[in-house]
Amino acid sequence: MAIVKVKEIIGISPNSFEDALQNAINHACEEKQNVTGAKIVGQTVSIENGRIVEYKVNVKIAYRWEKELHQ
């Protein structure tokens, strides 16, 4: 039996929403080996002097929790 756990994180990039999402996924994969999916739940930007300076993506990351159950 496998259990899927969901963790919400925010990816950030000065370049694009896509880079922000990739940063979130990279971080999740470094932390957990069993990442199985991601859902974008929100996108925002930081603005300074009328310009976008930071893209942020709120992501729910799903991963199999099976290994943690056996430890």
Image (tube, helix red, strand yellow):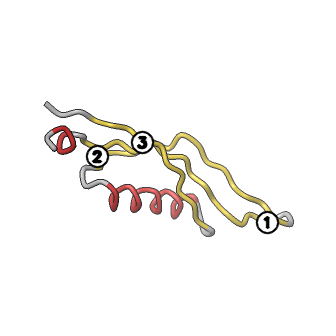
Q: Are marks 2 and 3 in contact (CB under 8 Å)?
A: no
Nearer-N-terminus badge (1/3): 3
Using the numbered discs, state the Cα–Cα distance from disc 2 to disc 3 in whole angstroms: 12 Å
Image quadrant of residue 67? Answer: top left
Q: CA distance from mark 1 to mark 3?
A: 31 Å
- How dense is the environment of label 3, judged by Cα within 10 Å: few (below 14), some, or many (20 and up)? few
The front one of 4 and 67 is: 67
Q: Quadrant of the C terminus?
A: top left
The residue tagged 3 is 7
Q: Which mark is residue 36?
A: 2
Where residue 26 appears, as percent x and y from the top left, is: 39, 62
Query: Who's the residue at 61% across and 55% down the image?
Result: 56
Question: Given the current orientation, which residue lies at the most extreme right position?
Answer: 49
Q: Is residue 20 above or below residue 36?
A: below
Residue at the outermost bottom position: 15
Q: Is residue 2 left or right of residue 14?
A: left
Q: Which residue is mark 1?
A: 51
Check disc 1: other Cα within 10 Å, few if <14, some if 14-19, many if 20+. few
Q: Secondary structure at mark 2?
A: strand
Residue 45 horizontal/vertical position (percent): 69, 55
| 69 versus 32 height, above or below | above
Q: CA distance from mark 1 to mark 2?
A: 35 Å
Which badge, 2 or 3, is on the more N-terminal residue? 3
